[in-house]
Amino acid sequence: MSHLINIRIVLILLQMSQLIANGIEFIDEASSQGLVFNHDHGGTGERYYIETIGPGVCLFDYDNDKDLDIYFCQGSKLPGSDQNIILENKLFRNDGKFWTDVTSLAGVGDKSYSMGCACGDVDNDGNIDLYVTNFGEDVFYKNEGNGTFSNVTVSAGISNPKWGASVALFDMDSDGLLDIYISNYVEFSLTNNPWCGDRVRGIRDYCKPDFFNGIEDKLYKNKGNWKFEDVSTKSGILGKNGKGLGVIPADFDFDGDLDIYVANDGVMNHYYINDGYGYFEENAIFNGIGYNGNGLPEAGMGVDIGDVNGDGWLDIFVTNFSGESNTIYINNRMGYFNDLTFSSGLQQPSLNYVGFGTKLLDLDNDGWLDLFVVNGHVAANINDVHSGYTYAQKKQIFLNNRNGKFKELKLDATDDVNSASVGRGAAFGDIDNDGDVDIVIANNNGPANLLIRKGNPEKNWVGFSLVGVKSNKDAIGALITINSHDLLQKRVVNTAGSYMASNDKRILFGLDNQSNIEKIEIKWPSGIVDKYERIKVNNYYEVIEGESIKLLMKNKG
């Protein structure tokens, strides 16, 4: 019997060593690179519900110098605060392993109680614009192309005085202009802050989301020339109150237009099917993604999409509250889904965590999408109530086993992914342009993390930056298919997803050990299809719709 136990131990250790020895290691370089941002939720002990939800973060190249800059959403002082400080959102310019605070220079230091943000070239002028959701009126910034932004909220016709959360920029009617979808959260007022907690012991706590009514989302159509029309009613999304926290657009049924998926907190998620002309029919229950596999609503927060099983169809991953587990919905063709969380191996490892920011991405460059999840509880005293839960929580990485299952990666104890924080928004992108994905995390009431992937990719890769001509300039919604020997992969250009965040618009493909790409096909939102052959690996390429493909930048490694 002892021999059997020893063999089992050896096998377990071998499995762990294989998982550790895959070259995946992150280092938090926020401090060493001078990226100093501390979120302040403004709490005074009154347990205002808004203290628990944010913040978000955006990765985007605001100055067109071919590297990613960072925008953080900040809280604000709340009633009862005696803090003599100024809280404002922050923009940091990437100056090559050093970050410069250019907030004042750029004019984007919104002092509202901010939640999330989204980035995109709204007017197709080659400059990335910025939208910020707030507890209260949102803010819309136009990038002037000279390092500064203008507040165009009022003149653009934007009015969202509710509690905005995540926002997605996408072209809903294929007219070449980015429209705006805003997921609004719940009805809450600072002047009517309900008392929740244990009155017997006099312990006040944050109220649960089911204590508040949900509010309707917003959809704005881009009419051009920085004019937007509120089409929430005539588009079909109004009247379906949710408690939206996460949102992502994608062509789930591959009919040529972008649908919308909204992760709601504690109520049914929403799935809006686009008719191609900007009208949406909500059909989440029929399509199997309104509730989990047990027919229950979950506390949806973060969301992302990707082809996790290599069948060419887009699947959906949603982060949820502790005790519920996160959820993965597998697309069984034409936009109909099955909850395969349990069989995928993702249920048990997430039960003790509260998931927020997330991304399906190829961390080991083997051609299969892995999973990164940012965690953090909402109750600071949760360990006093539930011994199995903690307030600050580690991040999680799940590797794709290529057989419909994921396995949590057991990282070395020194890896900064293991460091606990109260994670919220997470933005993903190749910050150092070396061919792998780095991560910036906005933590609630604490310092941000800048997780830089250590070393150069051990396996081959290729990256694409798409420029729309007839399509929107960012090419949001474009479908890229690559064929490299036995690897057939599809990726969608989409900056939305995660949680209150905006991600790098470039697309990275892992190629395993393949040394060349035989075929590339790009289906643009306009319907144009471009095809290319025999592209060298380990480089970034710029592709202009209907025109050309050219080397954008060489491998830094």
Image (cartoon, grey):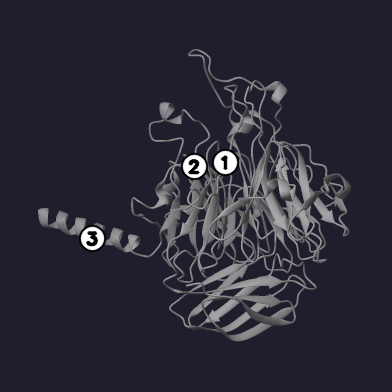
Element at label 2: loop
Judging depth in this view, the residue of 143 and 153 nearest the camera is: 143
Residue at the (42%, 45%) spot, across then down? 419
Q: Where does label 2 land, which residue?
A: 324
Cα separation between marks 1 and 2: 8 Å
For the residues labelled 1 and 2, say whether their Cβ atoms are less than 8 Å apart.
yes
| Mark 1 crowd level (few <14, some 14–19, many ≥20, 10 Å Cα) | many
Q: Amino acid at mark 1?
A: Ala
Q: Amino acid at mark 3?
A: Leu
- In the drawing, what numbered circle is on residue 299? 1
Q: Earlier in the sequence, mark 1 or mark 2?
A: 1
- Whether residue 358 is visible: yes
Toward the left, the furthest residue is: 2
Q: Dividing the picture into quarters, in which one does residue 424 lie?
A: top right
Element at label 3: helix
- In the drawing, what numbered circle is on residue 11? 3
Q: Relative to residue 37, is residue 498 depicted above or below?
A: below
On the picture, is 392 further left or further right than 285? left
Q: Relative to residue 170, is residue 355 depicted above or below?
A: above
Residue at the (83%, 66%) spot, across then down? 175
Q: Residue 500 at x, y = what percent?
A: 63, 47
Q: Residue 2 at x, y = what percent?
A: 11, 53
Q: Residue 59 at x, y = what percent?
A: 62, 56
Element at label 1: loop
Q: Earlier in the sequence, mark 3 or mark 1?
A: 3
Q: Residue 379 at x, y = what percent?
A: 51, 31
Residue at the (56%, 57%) spot, across then down? 428
- In the drawing, what numbered circle is on residue 10? none
Q: Amino acid at mark 2?
A: Glu
On the picture, is 57 further left or further right than 446? right
